Image (tube, grey):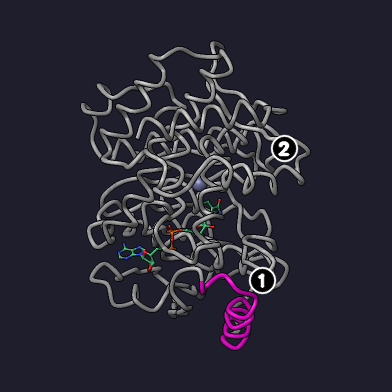
Amino acid sequence: VIVDVDLGERSYDIVVEAGARHRLRELLSERAPNAQCVALVTSVPLESMPWFDLDSGVDQFVLSVPDGEAAKTMLALEGVLETLAGRRLSRDDVIVGVGGGAVTDLAGFAASVYLRGVALVQVPTSLVGQVDAAIGGKTAVNLRAGKNLVGAFHQPLGVLCDTAVLDTLPERDRRCGLGEIAKCWLLEGRDADELAGTTFANLIATSVRLKASLVVSDEFERGARVLLNYGHTLAHALEKIALARDTDELRHGEAVAIGVAFAPRLAKQLGRVDDGVIATHDAVLDGLGLERRLPRGVDAGAILEAMSHDKKAHHDLSFVLPGSDGFALVSGVNDDEVRRALDDFKGES
Ligand SMILES: NC(=O)c1ccc[n+]([C@@H]2O[C@H](COP(=O)([O-])OP(=O)(O)OC[C@H]3O[C@@H](n4cnc5c(N)ncnc54)[C@H](O)[C@@H]3O)[C@@H](O)[C@H]2O)c1
Ligand SMILES: [Zn+2]
């Protein structure tokens, strides 16, 4: 499947297929014909994966960064930039990010600032990377004050989503990707029966298409792209609570699945949808094997408290919610309504 992202002169294709990584050479010869050197930015454990056999067709070198979130620091960024300069990577050359979302976020940000911007290709190897992080041009590193506080919009020349490399992905990382996929599937108005009848590659492609279309209509995230935050208001609060307890019990994608289960319940509380919509959400999440209940020991009070930090930034609680006219950002949601919906949700489990 090839999904084109139509952004005028910044347009590019996202290829979703088994073996997509082997298209790197062809992609570079079409989109960066003057490139003489390619930096393959990846993380240490991925370098030795059986599928790490990328061939750019020109001089290339591997630049390894720490694995996971440890890649997304100013220090790691500086290390990457110094290496690129040491290797004399020029403005005609290309940075290729090969890894999970952490690596593609770092590689993308490095490409956006090195020599005031060089070309970038993303080869996302995690499910989160393929359906979310590597698409759309957002790049970032973290600060101590918070995640993704320094970054840039920098669209790639192309994205190669190779489904074959997912074979080595740990189960938990796979589940995180499925959380975002469930979100996209429901935003697309699809149900559990359609889910049962589809292939894994099509699940990825459906999410990629949805994200690509929202990026096209809102490249710099001023409006429509906010729909991708479906399930995320609760998810962010749950992640914050888990982090404060210093537990690894909840990853982002897992929290999103719970947030996606909660959203139609809150929507019903607000009179926007009926029970059928809740049942559809539950069936899709169950169909993907995702946990959709609140973690034990987390109550409505703690969640509202965690949400109130977001509130300070945005002045009131807002949620992307389903309704009779489709999905919309609903602002100014009353604390009491949220509490009641959370108590009911908690009571179900
Ligand atoms: N830029 C965006 O729009 C955007 C969107 C969503 C998420 N993100 C970012 O993405 C990051 C999360 O991405 P992630 O979930 O991919 O986490 P990650 O990059 O930390 O990768 C998770 C783990 O999977 C490993 N891995 C990746 N591919 C593998 C493979 N094929 N086989 C075996 N192991 C593999 C990685 O080495 C790592 O240990 C976060 O930093 C988040 O902020 C960015
Ligand atoms: Zn997310």
- Residue 211: x and y, percent? 51, 38
Q: Is residue 140 above or below residue 270?
A: below
Circle 1 residue: 144
Q: Which residues are magenta?
A: 70-87
* The magenta stretch spans residue 80: yes
> In the rendered structure, which disc, 1 or 2, sits on the residue that comes first in sequence?
1
* Quarter holding residue 275: top left
Q: Is residue 244 left or right of residue 274?
A: right
Q: Secondary structure at mark 1?
A: loop
Q: Main SS type for the magenta part?
A: helix
* The magenta stretch spans residue 201: no
- Residue 15: x and y, percent? 39, 46
Q: Residue at the location (54% across, 11% down)? A: 324
Circle 2 residue: 222
Q: Quadrant of the N terminus?
A: top left
Q: Secondary structure at mark 2?
A: loop
- Residue 291: x and y, percent? 32, 42
Q: Residues within 10 Å of mark 1 (few under 14, many from 20)?
A: few
Q: Residue at the location (27% across, 72% down)? A: 49
Q: Quadrant of the C terminus?
A: top left
Identify which amino acid the numbered label 1 is placed on: Arg
Identify which amino acid the numbered label 2 is placed on: Arg
| Gap between marks 1 and 2 measured at Cα | 26 Å
Q: Is residue 141 left or right of residue 51?
A: right
Q: Residues within 10 Å of mark 2 (few under 14, many from 20)?
A: few
Q: Is residue 45 left or right of residue 91?
A: left
Q: Residue at the location (52% across, 27% down)? A: 341
- Residue 135: x and y, percent? 51, 48
Q: Which mark is residue 271?
A: none
Query: Can you tell me whether the CB of the residue at mark 2 lies under 8 Å from the nearest atom of ligand 1?
Result: no
Closer mark to the observer between disc 1 and disc 2: 1
